[in-house]
Image (tube, rainbow, N blue to C red):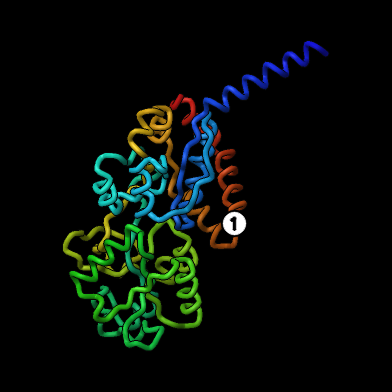
Amino acid sequence: MKLLRIVLCILSVVALSFSANAKTIKMAKANWDTGYFQAEIYKMALEELGYKVAKPQAIKPSVFYVAAAQGDIDLWVNGWFSTHDTYIKEAKGKVKPVGYVMKKGGLQGYLIDKRTADKLNIKSVMDIKKHAKTFDANGDGKADMVACPPGWGCEKQITKHFAELKLGEFINPVKAEYSASMADAIARYKNGKSVLFYTWTPNWTVGALKLGKDVVWIEVPYSKTKATKVNNATKSSINLGFGADDIRPAANVDFLKKNPKVEKLLKVASIPLSDISAQNMKMNKGEKSERDVKRHAKEWVKANKSTFDGWIKKAK
């Protein structure tokens, strides 16, 4: 009995010592729900590596990069590059992207419903000018387009499109909460109305409105981007107005220097686009609570245990 108390005492001291020495990582996650799954998997990996991770708070990019530069937040895994390049420049060397959650999988652009595209022969965002009233939801004569909320990186790019192409003359960008705005657009589509919206992939939106069947990408003749081959578009080679982005972790540079294991982990970890898309579809079908996302992440780790364990082994 005495020996048992001694052993328990030693274990308690070891546990307390580990707790005192363990770095608590201040992690953020994107305020778009399609990024929650990746954040949860990386959080689990950091914990497996021996770190404590504070509950990630959902924030917009403009807030994350400022907070990370100041050292108030250590990292997140929801960077979109090149869309977030301007934020990195503004951080002046204090924040950097490291590793890849997914390479060149992040398509962005504007879509309309296919039946309207076919009926009115709409190929480009500029064609909307002739048919603005078709997409008018509030009666002001302009086409209503679900856009990006303030503070998202895509908002800056959309603003550039509107300035160069004078889209504001016939399109009203709706900058309300994105998921709610998209839910409204989907309801309009199901009621036979025409819809115009910005989106990205992977995203549940193109599960609810299927690419090529319900909606198609339209061209944005923006001078700073080039045409590429894109499936489910109004043209086989099309300028989407956005480059194909890499989804990458981004972290405070000083934090990474002090925690080289974290940097190693971020460099070796990645998640297939197909797996992210599959999880996003589960969210679209109603499995979108915090508990659901945590379960999805745990299921992914269990199904990909050798891959997950490989990350940890390489990072140690």
Residue placed at 32% from the left, 41% from the top?
A: 97
Q: Is residue 23 left or right of residue 302?
A: left
Farthest right residue? 1
Compared to residue 60, the image places residue 221 above or below, namely: below
Which amino acid type corresponds to the residue marked 1 in the rendered image? Ser
Residue placed at 27% from the left, 74% from the top?
A: 125
Residue bearing the label numbered 1? 289
Compared to residue 174, the image places residue 61 above or below, namely: above
Give the x, y percent position of residue 231. Answer: 34, 61
Farthest top residue? 3
Give the x, y percent position of residue 67. Answer: 37, 47
Badge 1 local density, few (<14 within 10 Å), some, or many (20+)?
few
Q: Would residue 248 be seen by someone viewing this image from the given angle?
A: yes
Residue placed at 34% from the left, 77% from the top?
A: 117
Instruction: Give the camera-side residue of 288 and 305.
Output: 288
| Mark 1: secondary structure | loop
Q: Would residue 49 be seen by someone viewing this image from the given angle?
A: no
Give the x, y percent position of residue 226. Answer: 20, 59
Q: Is residue 110 left or right of residue 184?
A: left
Quadrant, the N terminus: top right
Compared to residue 67, the image places residue 260 above or below, namely: above
Residue placed at 46% from the left, 24% from the top?
A: 316
Give the x, y percent position of residue 23. Answer: 49, 31
Quadrant for residue 305, please give it: top right
